[in-house]
Amino acid sequence: MELMEEQQHQRYQKALKIVKRQKAFYRHLIVYLVIMMALFVMRYFIFPKIGYYYEDQGFKDWLNWNTYGLAAVWLIAIIIQGIVVFKSKTISNWEENKIQEILSKEEINNNQKWK
């Protein structure tokens, strides 16, 4: 009985860890979207109203690199985090299924030996 409770507790802890990782991923994605929307609103609506940056080509280049560069690098980081979070779930499910398959094969082999 204690062994089953311990296994159940371990499975719960493992599931909790997966849920926390997924929650962190979604939180990261939401922060990215909010900041990128704010950045692009500033870039295309607020800065043009200021007007002075049109005169300075160096500032325009710097602004473009920072706007698009930040968005691209941060998006790559989010994609990598998503792959790590959701792939680990798939791998752990595969591992559990494979273990059950091997155990059932061994049980069948053991039962056949005694007949």
Image: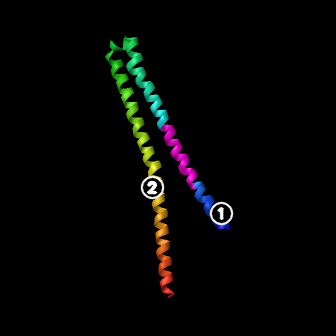
Q: Main secondary structure of the magenta part?
A: helix
Q: Tell whether 14 sits left or right of 37.
A: right
Residue in the picture at 58% in, 51% down: 16
Residue in the picture at 45% in, 32% down: 33
Label 1 secondary element: helix
Residue in the picture at 40% in, 32% down: 71
Label 2 secondary element: helix
- Residue 18 magenta: yes
Vertical placement of residue 68 versus 87, above or below: above
Residue in the picture at 67% in, 68% down: 1
Scheme of image coloration: rainbow
Q: Tell whether 4 sits left or right of 40.
A: right
Location of mark 2 (residue) = 90
The amino acid on which the numbered mark 2 sits, given as a three-letter code, is: Thr
Q: Give the range drawn in magenta.
A: 14-28
The amino acid on which the numbered mark 1 sits, given as a three-letter code, is: Glu
Residue 6 image offset from top left, x and y in percent: 64, 63
Location of mark 1 (residue) = 5
- 51 or 16: nearer the viewer: 16
- Residue 108 magenta: no
How many residues crowd around disc 1 within 10 Å: few (fewer than 14), some, or many (20 or more)?
A: few
Residue 90 image offset from top left, x and y in percent: 45, 55
How many residues crowd around disc 2 within 10 Å: few (fewer than 14), some, or many (20 or more)?
A: few
